[in-house]
Amino acid sequence: MSARTVLISGAGIAGSALAHWLLQCGFTPVIVERADSFREGGYIMDFWGVGFDAAERMNLISDLRDRSYHPTEVKLLDNQSRRTGGFCTEIFKKQLGDRFFSILRGDMAAVIYAKIKNSVEVIFGDSIDSIEANADGAYVRFERGRPRQFDLVIGADGLHSRVRKLMMPSNAVPYKYLGYYCAAFSTEGYEPRDEGSYVSYSAPGQMIARYALRNNKTVFFFTFASKHEMQYDHRDRQGAQRILTEKYSQSPWIEVPAILRAMRTSDDLYFDAVSQIRLEQWHKGPIALVGDAAYCPSLLAGQGSAFALAGAYVLAEELKNAGGDFSAAFDQYQSVLQGFVQKKQLAAENFGGWFAPSSWLAIKFRDKMTQLFGLPIVGRKIISRALEDKLNLPRYSD
């Protein structure tokens, strides 16, 4: 096997999952993570389909279920918190059986990281400064640590991937902005809780949702439309607070003032543009990308974690099958996943209009449409189309 040492940038879902599979396949992964320690928290997401399949192969389902949530309904509200639409989530269970649940992104990341943290070298508080391809693989300089040689470098460092920037020409633009921004944070002691209900309010071009977590916590999720991209640093928490306060301070929902107060005391605020990453090539020389770094479907698509798990599995197994011939392995990895990913990205382009309709009339129409989910035949058809995953993960031999 000619390629054995693999540097992974990013200790999130994609990076930790890839490290797990590389270990199983006989490689030696090393993870470098910009944050000073492992990061939890984050937004709540639904989990099913190809991501569920990949998690099963990692024997993660039991641990993920221990941290999962099972909303009983989606409740849409008006300015005075009166119900205007929504649906019972039982329809999802009927469609997918027991292969569907909700979970915090950080909880999923923590479960995966726990599987590899004692077996993999993890460098916190550092990041890649430069990568120089050579006859022996890749010579990597770090922002803080000493330079090191690796056989391969994999960018699992998300939407704003440093590895992708180093891999691509300076004039390449793989980033597709979809016209929305999202934010999420959690807080303790918020009332009302509406246990088991995913509660959502919309005004033209904006939405706020909340869900009650364990230990008296509540997680909030924001979406708002913006025709043009804003100049901001996605790691600037105070800047994000100012933007959200400006966008929502005039919102007519009676809960908004309390939510904005809670946001200002939260220490886990996430804020970013709703965007996709579209690349013709997911690799160059001894460098490749996995997860959002290569094919982010957008936060509103709800499948970034699923793509990350599937991509990590396929990439590691193809490297093993190719005997370490990384060029052949990278090509096959992309061939297996790219068509599926592209279809999902196309379908996700218009999701923002569902979360944050553009007018009061559009909101009313959306709310009425949700009532159709309760009709057996209509509801099954709508949910089936929304949840279908037309990708069977390859079964690799031991």
Image: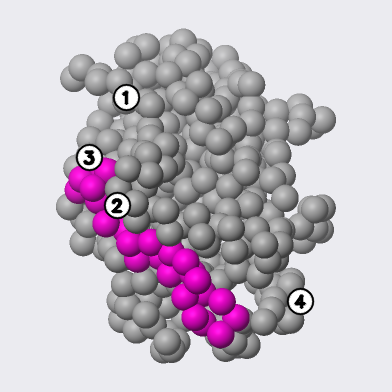
Instruction: Please give left or right for residue 39 compared with residue 205 in the image.
Output: left
Residue occupying the point 43% across, 69% down: 75
The residue under label 1 is 392
**Residue 192 highlighted magenta (yes or no):** no
Eyeballing the image, is 258 above or below 276? Answer: below
Start-end of magenta stretch = 73-99
| Of pointers 3 and 1, the one earlier in the residue sequence | 3
Residue under label 4: 246
Give the image quarter of residue 357. bottom right
Give the mark nearest the N terminus, 1 or 4.
Answer: 4
**Dot 2 lies on which element?**
helix
* Badge 4 amino acid: Glu
Disc ID at residue 91: 2
Residue 20 % position (x, y): 31, 39
Q: Residues within 10 Å of mark 1 (few under 14, many from 20)?
A: few
Q: CA distance from mark 1 to mark 2?
A: 23 Å
Give left or right: position of 215 versus 81. Answer: left
**Residue picked out by circle 3:** 56
Asked if marks 3 and 4 touch (Cβ < 8 Å), the reply is: no
Colour scheme used in the picture? one colour
Q: Nearer the viewer, mark 4 or mark 2?
A: 2
Q: Position of residue 266 (x, y in %)?
A: 54, 80
- Residue 216 sits in quarter: bottom left
